[in-house]
Image (cartoon, rainbow, N blue to C red):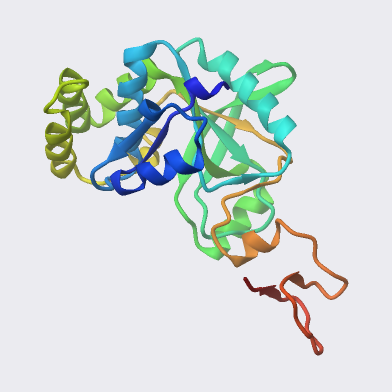
Amino acid sequence: IPWPNIYVVTANQHTALVQEQLPQLPKENIIGEPVGRGTALCIGLAALALAKKDPHGVTAVLPADHAVQNEDRFRKLLEIAFKFASQGTHLITLGINPRRPATGYGYIQGGEVLTRIDGREILKVKRFTEKPSYERAREFLAQGDYFWNSGMFIWRVDTILEEIKAHLPNLHAGLTELGTHMGKTDYERVLSRVYSAQKAISIDKGVMEKSAHVVVIPTGEIGWSDVGDWVAWAELFPADADGNVIQAPHIGIDTKDSVILSQ
């Protein structure tokens, strides 16, 4: 994806830092939020900006703090997802094969095979389950048809805006008002007012759990992590013979199964 087609949504106070860290990114592609109101509004704001450029454009929503080790396979998955999303009929999420009964992730239960593209199955989604108990997470792992919700989504711009309109009408009304002020001198003032009037909600709870048009593509092994805790962080690095992940000068005495980190 070329730099002119990459957009970053971040807090207003971080836009200068994003520009400093991503000098290749056009300045106008950095979208600032006045306050945090959850991913539904964040994604809606990005879709609004993209609709001005290409209302039928296919978009991948990728949280910036995730790590993917197998980049080639990940790109192939995105190509498949883009092909399917271009039809404008579904919201696509990438499902991570669970490696352990994690309680910090949402889970997606896959259903029947809707279609195959380049040999990759695309499954209907039966249900979403937010951060289960340890026992339920163990059940999901044993059942074999559940995936971790990666929080990565692919869809057409007009498709997600229609789904927001159907399931979050108040949020959509705010976006519609914002759209009439984009590029005008009062945009920032209207943006602040619209944001402050909205309740915080995630795209998962606001749209994905309600829509009848959600599908999941199982990713297989792409080395994904949201680096959400020390266990997840440790999985990104090789361990020594005693199970230690060491990123520091240290003296270890009978040290096993530990993370040792220092800057």
**Number of dots carrying numbers:** 0
Tell which residue pokes out farthest to the bottom in this image: 253
Question: Percent from the top left, x then y, of residue 36?
Answer: 28, 48
Image quadrant where one finds the N terminus: top right
Front in this rendered view, residue 122 or 200: 200
Front in this rendered view, residue 66 or 97: 66
Q: Could you tell whether 126 is left or right of 70 in the image? A: left
Q: Quadrant of residue 34?
A: top left
Question: Percent from the top left, x then y, of residue 128?
Answer: 47, 42
Q: Could you tell whether 153 is left or right of 260 in the image? A: left
Question: Percent from the top left, x then y, of residue 174?
Answer: 17, 29
Q: Quadrant of residue 158?
A: top left
Residue 174 seen from this side: yes
Front in this rendered view, residue 101 or 62: 62
Q: Residue at x 35, y 24 (%)?
A: 47
Front in this rendered view, residue 104 or 59: 59
Residue 91 seen from this side: no
Q: Could you tell whether 30 is left or right of 194 in the image? A: right
Q: Residue at x 78, y 84 (%)?
A: 255
Image quadrant where one finds the C terminus: bottom right
Q: Is residue 160 above or below residue 224?
A: above
Tell which residue pokes out farthest to the right in this image: 241
Q: Is residue 231 above or below residue 213?
A: below
